[in-house]
């Protein structure tokens, strides 16, 4: 939630990890090699924010013999934020490490449980969240007092010596000098920082009263959408953050206003939220948030901490939290390990996964607010639920535990019958009604012979159909022998293959009534003639290769096999191959057909500017690159029965510079929807070998979310969706219509049945096959009759 991270414009004060730093100057010598002991006696800390101060206190408390000096270029009572929110988890760590600091915090905390979302004159409150906040100035005073009492040397209004000099003169240098860290920049060649800017401007302000909840208020102005984030931090004070996209900020004229005029205008825009009260500033400036990521956090005896190492957007309130937790982990690792090198390595290994997870959540939250205009027309409670679950850390299940009344109201508004989780509500695509929202995602099995699906495919797809999902998709079924990825790929280029598929669809329809089965048609393009995945992904066959074709003569990997650029005649031939395969799919009894235009295969290769370098009518602009995939779609749609739905899988980003962007993906989806696509299956990547995907839980769903709201077409979300809680959350928030899961269905073919059992659901959205009903309750796994202790004695 909004809290304490504060960045500033160039030349202004540093962010919340402390404003102190040496003036930017090059490092003239290398840091000292790590000492043989992990208990450095002379410690230099650059930056007097909470992270630096708390690290100083902890290290001094662990070894009073240490000489610790902290530099802060600002005055001790200078502070450039207002309130700080800390989680129970962080407070628990502080309590165990330093009860005195914890007790001081406790005396000043303001606590509350509610979140208010105000939008279009509707106010919805969700409770049970649990927040604790205090003033940033008071937090710093507590840490100053603690450091002084322990004997830490605090040097305020003093520039720190150059990083290289500190590294020579001290055993350990802790760079806690904020988002604009000069220490980090001095050794940028080692830390390899990446600093990303974002689309919104924001300003930190304060109000002279305490909100009674964490408040989000949306203002729709003639110039665009603005939002207020507000929360109390004292009995008579609240932090107020005003945020809007850059273009809205400029259109409103904020770029021409001074600080006083900006503050007055913000108070006028949000007069209802403030009850007509004014806002105050503290050298407040409009700025854009910067996400900082470093490949390394330490170099010799220099280590990064807090915002110098990483930042997380204020909308999830993690700046001070992360910095304090960094300090705790660093102190613990220095205490536990025998030498400095091992200790700093352990510190980074412990903190990096936690920080990466927080940054993913923060980025999801940041992007949600950047794109808030997409959600304004959602029903009020759905909008509120969407906002609350935006980072994917708050989910349907834990929100239901925190506030069952609010969650039940959202479910009723969505249309869930009583006792029905969102994932078990039906969904209609053209003439096909799916009984729930779960799809078994296409997964290449590479287990066919001459393109024929055999017993393996019957068992594989049949088992997952029996497992309760509403729709089971085949792997990519190839339209020609040359269109295969590997020799083990299935096809629909012979009648014999169509008959074999008929055996699979008949089993699904007869033995798993209520489950639909879909076929995904595709052509491998330049990614064909390779080994099965487990023998070497995308590696060429040692022999028996077939010729490769593509939009342009570009190999998938450097030094890889070169495909031929398709001529106009060959394009027509391939289009006919798709049509014939679709006609066979009709005879095979498939309920749905998906056209594979993703992952760098042939049709995807036409869409991406990185793989389509053609100069004819099929290359150049996005509209031209769409031409052949749309021709194939139209030709297939013409022979696919009108009552049966047809979907398209796309890669919404190439995860590579100059490739398909999220904006392009919206236009690609819009074009397919205009040609009759019933849903867009939104995947990402695998188009170019040099991609750099940003993996994480549900990491591809924001692309589906945007397409759904901008284009107005149903979407299927894919990508690291692994729990039924995720499915419920995504469906109820309106980010997707269907969820496709791959690996979870490999782990558990009965994933959907088990999801129903675990949620206590027994309605029409899922049905246990009659032979399996005896297993519809979890088996007992051990004794349950052990007597509980009746008496506990304490010394």
Image (spheres, rainbow, N blue to C red):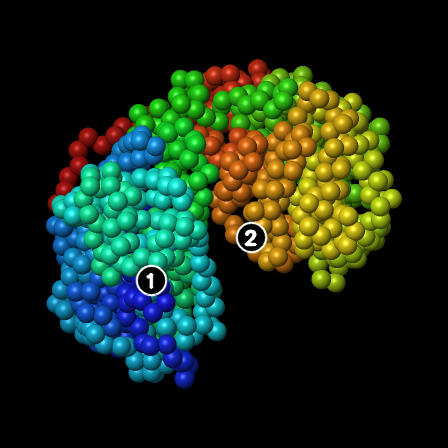
Local crowd size for mark 2, using a 10 Å CA cut-off: few (<14), some (14–19), many (≥20): some
Check whether the beta carbons of the residues at disc 1 and disc 2 lie within 8 A of each other. no
The picture places residue 584, in percent across and down from the top left corner, at: 80, 27
Residue at (31%, 54%) from the top-left corner?
Answer: 203
Q: Is residue 403 left or right of residue 593?
A: left
Of the image marks 1 and 2, the number of the one nearer the N terminus:
1
Give the image quarter of residue 389: top left
Query: Quick check: can you spot residue 433?
Result: yes
Quadrant showing the C terminus: top left
Query: Quick check: can you spot residue 507?
Result: no
What number of labels is visible?
Answer: 2
Q: Is residue 99 above or below residue 164?
A: above
Residue at (34%, 32%) from the top-left corner?
Answer: 120
Callout 1: helix, strand or loop?
A: loop
Give the image quarter of residue 171: bottom left
For disc 1, the marked residue is: 8
The picture places residue 571, in percent across and down from the top left corner, at: 82, 43
The picture places residue 758, in percent across and down from the top left corner, at: 43, 27
Q: Is residue 581 above or below residue 420?
A: below
Q: Nearer the viewer, residue 270 or 331?
A: 270
For disc 2, the marked residue is: 693
Residue at (13%, 64%) from the top-left corner?
Answer: 145
């Amino acid at each position: 939630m909004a809290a304490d991270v504060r960045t500033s414009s160039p030349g202004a004060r540093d962010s919340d990890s402390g404003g102190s730093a040496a003036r930017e100057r090059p490092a003239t010598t290398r840091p000292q090699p790590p000492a043989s002991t992990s208990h450095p006696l002379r410690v230099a800390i650059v930056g007097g924010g909470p992270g630096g101060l708390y690290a100083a206190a902890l290290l001094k408390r662990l070894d009073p013999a240490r000489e610790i000096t902290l530099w802060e270029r600002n005055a001790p009572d200078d502070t450039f934020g207002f309130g700080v929110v800390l989680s129970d988890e962080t407070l628990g760590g502080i309590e165990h490490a330093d009860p005195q600091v914890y007790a001081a915090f406790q005396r000043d905390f303001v606590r509350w449980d509610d979140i208010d979302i105000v939008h279009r004159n509707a106010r919805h409150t969700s409770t049970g969240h649990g927040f604790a906040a205090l003033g940033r100035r008071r937090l710093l005073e507590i840490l100053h007092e603690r450091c002084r009492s322990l004997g830490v040397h605090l040097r305020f209004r003093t520039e720190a010596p150059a990083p290289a000099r500190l590294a020579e003169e001290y055993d350990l240098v802790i760079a806690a000098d904020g988002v604009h860290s000069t220490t980090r920049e001095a050794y940028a060649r080692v830390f390899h920082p990446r600093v990303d800017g974002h689309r919104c401007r924001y300003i930190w302000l304060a109000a002279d009263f305490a909100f009674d909840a964490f408040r989000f208020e949306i203002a729709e102005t003639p110039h665009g959408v603005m939002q207020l984030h507000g929360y109390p931090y004292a009995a008579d004070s609240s932090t107020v953050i005003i945020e809007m996209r850059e273009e809205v900020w400029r259109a409103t004229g904020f770029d021409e206003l001074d600080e006083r005029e900006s503050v007055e205008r913000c108070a006028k825009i949000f007069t209802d939220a403030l009850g007509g009260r004014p806002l105050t500033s503290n050298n407040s400036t409009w700025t854009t948030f910067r996400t900082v990521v470093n490949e390394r956090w330490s170099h010799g005896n220099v280590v990064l901490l807090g915002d110098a190492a990483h930042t997380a957007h204020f909308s999830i309130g993690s700046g001070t939290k992360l910095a304090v937790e960094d300090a705790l982990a660093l102190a613990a690792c220095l205490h536990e390990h025998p030498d400095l090198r091992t200790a700093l390595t352990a510190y980074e290994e412990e903190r990096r996964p936690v920080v990466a997870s927080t940054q993913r959540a923060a980025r999801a939250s940041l992007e949600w607010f950047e794109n808030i205009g997409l959600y304004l027309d959602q029903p009020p409670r759905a909008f509120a639920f969407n906002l609350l679950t935006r980072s994917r850390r708050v989910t349907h299940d834990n929100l239901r535990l925190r506030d069952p009344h609010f969650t039940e109201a959202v479910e009723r508004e969505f249309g869930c019958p009583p006792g029905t989780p969102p994932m078990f509500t039906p969904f209609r695509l053209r003439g096909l009604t799916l009984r729930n929202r779960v799809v078994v995602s296409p997964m290449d099995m590479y287990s066919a012979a001459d393109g024929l699906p055999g017993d393996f495919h019957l068992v594989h797809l049949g088992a997952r159909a029996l497992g309760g999902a509403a729709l089971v998709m085949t792997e990519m079924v190839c339209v020609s022998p040359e269109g295969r990825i590997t020799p083990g790929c299935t096809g629909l280029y012979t009648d014999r293959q169509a008959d074999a598929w008929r055996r699979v669809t008949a089993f699904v329809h007869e033995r798993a009534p209520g489950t639909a089965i879909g076929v995904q048609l595709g052509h491998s393009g330049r990614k064909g003639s390779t080994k099965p995945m487990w023998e070497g992904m995308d590696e060429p066959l040692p022999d028996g290769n077939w010729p490769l074709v593509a939009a342009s003569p570009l190999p998938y990997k450097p030094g890889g096999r070169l495909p031929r650029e398709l001529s106009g005649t060959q394009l027509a031939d391939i289009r006919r191959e798709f049509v014939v395969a679709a006609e066979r799919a009709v005879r095979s009894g498939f309920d749905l057909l998906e056209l594979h235009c993703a992952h760098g295969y042939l049709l995807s290769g036409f869409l991406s500017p990185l793989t389509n370098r053609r100069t004819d009518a099929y290359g150049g602009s996005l509209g031209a690159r769409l031409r052949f995939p749309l021709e194939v779609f139209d030709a297939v749609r013409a022979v696919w029965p009108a009552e049966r739905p047809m979907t398209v899988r796309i890669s919404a980003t190439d995860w590579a510079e100059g490739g398909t962007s999220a904006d392009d993906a919206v236009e690609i989806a819009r074009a397919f929807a205009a040609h009759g696509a019933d849903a867009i299956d939104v995947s990402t990547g695998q188009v170019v070998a040099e991609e750099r995907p940003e993996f994480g839980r549900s990491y591809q769903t924001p692309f589906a979310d945007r397409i759904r709201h901008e284009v107005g077409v149903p979407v299927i979300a894919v990508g690291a969706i692994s729990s039924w809680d995720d499915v419920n959350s995504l469906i109820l928030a309106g980010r997707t219509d269907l969820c496709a899961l791959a690996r979870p269905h490999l782990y558990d073919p009965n994933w959907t049945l088990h999801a129903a059992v675990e949620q206590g659901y027994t309605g029409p959205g899922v049905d246990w096959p009659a032979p399996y009903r005896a297993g519809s309750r979890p088996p007992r796994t051990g004794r349950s009759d052990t007597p509980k202790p009746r008496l506990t004695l304490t010394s």
